[in-house]
Amino acid sequence: MGNKQTVFTHEQLEEYQGHTERCRSGPSQFLSPQDCTFFTRKEIMRLFYRYQDLAPQVVPLDYTTCPEVKVPYELIGSMPELKDNPFRQRIAQVFSQDGDGHMTLENFLDMFSVMSEMAPRDLKAYYAFKIYDFNNDDYICAWDLEQTVTRLTRGELSAEEVTLVCEKVLDEADSDHDGRLSLEDFQNMILRAPDFLRCRFRPRDENSCCVI
């Protein structure tokens, strides 16, 4: 890695870093993960080399021509930060531009940005909501909750126990009693029970079953 050269144009690095200021301006600016990069140039380069090392036969070292390449989900999901995470496929799907888990470099940077300690709680809650929304209908319904609770508890609860937990969550957080959680419901729930936002991106943390 020591012999690798800078592979972005000055303008490309400026653009990546420019995302940081938009993110820091407030929750109303969190329009997409592409608007959120919390990294210095050095960190961007370090992440690029990690991305390139995942699939050196696919990802070129010269990115000045903006090549249209993706690293397959199978390789993304094998990273130390994800391989033991029960939400790894959903994380990759949410951050990939086509929802298939195959990631461009921009997708890869976006994922690490949102997972970073510098990302605000509102942003983390927004993407946790998207990850928990398994059927992608912009709500967390009872079925989504069942999938979420089963993964958060690593399958240690019985089906009846999972159902009881989901019913309790909906009873306490579903403000309009329509049987599902909106993003606003979810954000309010996080304020009351922040532990539910156990989605931190912790490499090799055996005690953490997290998403953001």
Image (spheres, grey):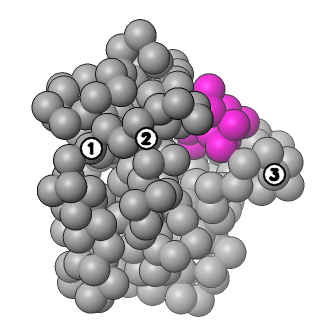
Q: Is mark 3 on a helix, strand or loop?
A: loop
Q: What element carries label 2?
A: helix
Query: Are the residues at dot 1 and dot 2 in contact (C-beta closer than 8 Å)?
Result: yes
Q: Give x and y (percent) for residue 18.
A: 23, 70
- Please state if 3 lies on the left or on the right of 27 as rendered: right
- Nearer to me, 39 or 179: 39
Q: Which of marks 2 and 3 is in front?
A: 2
Q: Where is residue 108 in the image (x, y as percent from the top left)?
A: 40, 43
Q: Determine which residue is flagged by label 1.
A: 8
Of 201 and 145, the residue lying toward us: 201
Q: Is residue 41 depicted above or below 30 in this figure?
A: above
Amino acid type, mark 1: Phe
Quadrant of image for the C terminus: bottom right
The structure residue drawn at horizontal position 26% and vertical position 23%, both measured from the top left corner, is: 69
Task: Assess disc 3: are there few (<14), some (14-19) or many (≥20) residues with their C-alpha within 10 Å of its C-alpha.
Answer: some
Q: Can residue 89 be seen in this view?
A: no
Closer to viewer: mark 3 or mark 1 = 1
Give whichever of discs 3 and 1 has the lower sequence position: 1
What segment carries the magenta color? Answer: 76-89
Q: Nearer the viewer, residue 60 or 122?
A: 60
Q: Name the residue under label 3.
A: 205
Residue that sits furthest to the top in the current view? 57
Residue 144: percent from left, percent from top: 46, 49
What is the crowding at mark 2: few (fewer than 14 residues within 10 Å), some, or many (at least 20)? many
Query: Which residue is labeled 2 in the image?
Result: 48
Is residue 80 inside the magenta stretch?
yes
In the image, is 115 to the left or to the right of 187? right
- Which of 42/52 is in front? 42
Amino acid under label 3? Asp
